[in-house]
Amino acid sequence: MTHRGASVGRLLASELDAPEGRVSERAIDLHANAHDASHFLLIPDALVIAKNAAEVGRLLGASARNGVPLTLRSGGTSLSGQGVTEGVLVDVRRNFRAIEVLDGGARVRVQPGATVRQVNARLAKTGRKLGPDPASESACTIGGVVANNSSGMACGTTGNTYQTLESMTLVLPSGTVVDTGAPDADARLRHDEPALFDGLLRLRDRVRGNPESVRVLRHQFSMKNTMGYGLNALLDHDDPAQILAHLVIGSEGTLGFVAEAVFRTLPLLPHASTSLVIFDDLLAANEALPGIVATGASAVELMDATSLRVGKLEADAHPIIRDLHVDRQAALLVEYQAATAEELAVLQAGGDVELGGLRLQAPAVLSSDAATRASLWHLRKGLYATVAGARPSGTTALLEDVVVPVPSLARTCTSLISLFDSYGYDDSVIFGHAKDGNIHFMLTDLFEGAGLERYAAFTEDMVDLVLGEGGSLKAEHGTGRVMAPFVRRQYGDELYAVMREVKRLCDPAGMLNPGVIITDDPQVHLKDIKATPTIEVEADRCVECGYCEPVCPSRDLTLTPRQRIVVKRAIASATAAGDTALAAELERDYDYEGVQTCAVDGMCQTACPVLINTGDLVRRLRKSEHSKPEKAVWTTAAKHWAATTKIAGTAMDVADVLPASLTPVVTGPNALARAVVGADVLPLWSPELPAGGARRARPAPSAEPEAVYVPACVNSMFGPAGGGEGVQRSFEELCERAGVSVLVPADIDSLCCGTPWSSKGLPDGAAVMRKRVLASLRAATRNGELPIVCDASSCTEGLLHTIEADAAEPRMRVVDVVDFVAERILPTVPPHEKIESLAVHPTCSSTRLGINPQLTAVAGTVAETVLIPDDWGCCAFAGDRGMLHPELTASATAAQAAEVKAFGAAAHASCNRTCELGMTRATGREYQHVLELLAAATRPHGTAPGAG
């Protein structure tokens, strides 16, 4: 009997060490975590955030003993419904992110919560990489990579998870832990799980003794294939421990929990050339495929006309596709990879010959330019979310994934298109890994009533088509719920019976991810299809892919961007259904979880294939939460900004000179006032904050200025680290030495980029400041003749947004000070002594502005060794957000701070004052603007600071 309601939480809490905050039955937690990237939606009874593998083992045991269904979830990027449940959902991402590089990179040990991108970033330093290369590599985690037998763009069937996984530490539903890499793994398995040990040997011999079973399995697994259990393990391996490990690969969390996995890595091929090859139609592209594959292409990715039509509308589309008039065309994204430039040249020469002999819409050009290649791959990797994001509001996107022998691909694509036409799926799209005969296609509909009946009939015809071509109904995305009813049809009664026995041996109670792969419900693929009600326009296009989650600073504290959006959808659904109690509960908790702890840093947009900035949604929501007095205060501040910043700076000066014994004189009343007016209104003062800064005004230069310099007002409120020079004096010193003259607007002390008002959702104050800033800068730049330079990356971005609202011509141009110095000042820097090491914190704004390479260049001029932490991310100080909610910055910076402390750099730098404050608080090390360090390092001996 399944335990439901509050009893589930109490039951599970008893299995955990210090369970507070890690077992939840709150509606907002259940609805936020219910959604994955698939088109299914089930709401769990309880959410558990596991701390370690031992806890997971106890949870699995409790699940089996008490009949409580349990599903493991890591990245939530799976597409077939294998990550959703009505039982208990266990988060095995948050506390399972360890990565250990072994044998100089030849192997790597990884926990399930690390993303493929994070692992490859560590391996890149050794010239190695993982074999699996899924398009979702920025967000998908190793747990899913193993559970789904991930492959991807280039790895095919030789570099996938099955082929490159060396060993795993597996926790069985009984709680038994199996290290398949241990020398005595088989002896331990026989001792701990005798029935499982004997059963695996029995199944091995049963399959091997049936010639038809061997034939079917050899054929099916000669292609990419994630349909059903990987029974090829019974043919490929003799020993039970290795058979078990390889059965678990692709088992979608139904046989056990993979606590860690050891992979054999592949050489990183650093040289590559890429081309988007455009054909007249899909048939022509498929017919050209064998010749292109024969030239040694590492990847050949197919995109049909609908893919191209949607992709060209994206704001960051490459000119090759942006300027294309799409009718019936199709494209192949072709890439060659090699270890050396010479090897690449040979491959590319063969490619040029082959591509040059094809009938194309335009000549194919193989490019090694990094920006061109990145843009083309961005199109392909984000294609699912981009196409799904273009669906009509309120409809659901459903992605299928099939494979056929490559000679059958053209015929299969043609037949699929005929099916689309027959069933009225007018906007369906076909794309995928053509080199492997693996294609994805997408349907968008309401999937209810007549729409659901249409989908059911289409699926039957599609299954017949693919199986009739000798293919598999799932190549990469896993069986999940969407194809579970068809596993028997693909493999036949005998092999399906073997699969059921595998499930029974590993999970006798049947409580681990029930309904996935093995099911008794022939209609499970037609049930629990998620609805996507229309919500605020800023987020309505979201397809819940989860790409945003790894870069979100609040991901381990409250909600991620995806979760902020799906909770809004849950509120809309509850309201439409008349469930006012649920809607009210979600709204109540959403204020802190969704609104107040969002850093509105925009990092989610850098990862989102459809460029959603969830911060825009949060800004809209914040507009409605301010009282009239609060709005009036902020509007008054905008009108009198010079006085406001002076008062703030003076307050910081007063607090700074207080002896430690009198710190409570500030902290006590500050805490009391926050309790009265609200933590979302009054910032929290803390002792590590600096004294106030200085006025920004400067006399007009005598020489002709090259740029208008806008020192950020934040530097007048928060002074330099450790009583240093500050970025304004340092930049002015660097300019003077280089013979560069800059003009500071005469009314600078009353100017601000406008971010404080826009981030808080205060349009009246923002309008006041915008009008003043535009008038001042229009005059100072001589009507746009001079560029504008700003010395805080978030303020540079804020000024860009302010100027975007200015319709006047000519347009004014804004440059961050780091970019300006890298281009204009660094070439003039004389030889100098560098410091030993420097830890650098790129900011969310420097990332969005695209100036991190320039930041690294400036840092490299300062220090012999520059560390940008592997765990770098937005610090979430976010103006005053880190002072309003210090727990947000603490959570966002925890991993990075540990890495910085372990590195022990001689100095620490960033390019934004509030981010420097956040990192100083997080690490206990003084962060300062990188230009302060550059000015000091390159200052001639005997020259006073600030002097030229």
Image (cartoon, grey):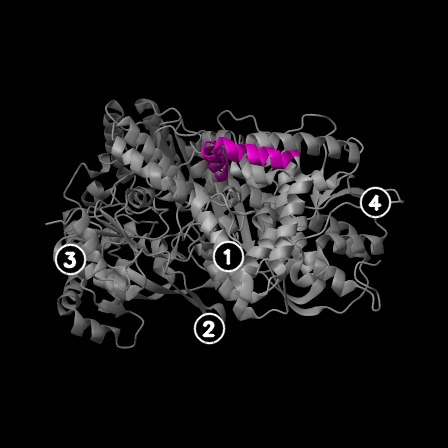
Residue 170 horizontal side relative to residue 891, left or right: left
Per the model, the C-alpha gap separating discs 1 and 2 is 51 Å
Mark number for residue 103?
2
Indicate the amino acid at tag 1. Thr
Q: Does dot 1 land on a helix, a strand or a loop?
A: helix
Q: CA distance from mark 1 to mark 4?
A: 39 Å
Label located before the other in sequence (2 or 3): 3
Mark 2 or 3: the one toward you: 3
| Residue 836 as seen in the image, left or right of residue 592 | right
Query: Closer to us: mark 1 or mark 2?
Result: 1
Q: Closer to the observer: label 4 or label 3?
A: 4
Are dots 1 and 2 in contact, CB under 8 Å?
no
Q: Is residue 890 depicted above or below 294 in this figure?
A: below
**For residue 198, what is the image quadrant?**
bottom left
Residue 64 circle label = 3
Pinpoint residue 468: horizontal percent, then vertical percent. Answer: 26, 38
User: What type is the residue that disc 4 sits on?
Assistant: Pro
The residue that mark 1 highlights is 667
Amino acid at circle 2:
Asp
Which one is nearer the viewer's eye here, 799 or 256?
Answer: 799
> Dot 4: few (<14), some (14–19), or many (≥20) neighbours within 10 Å?
few
Residue 657 in the image, given as x and y percentages of width and height: 63, 61
Tag 3: amino acid: Ala
Marks 1 and 4: CB-CB under 8 Å?
no
Q: Nearer the viewer, residue 478 or 919?
A: 919
> Start and end of the magenta stretch?
615-639
Badge 4 or badge 3: first in the primary sequence: 3
**Residue at disc 3, secondary structure:** helix
Categorize mark 3 by other alpha carbons within 10 Å: few (<14), some (14-19), many (20+): many
Identify the residue shown where x is 29% and y is 77%. 183
Q: CA distance from mark 2 to mark 3?
A: 39 Å
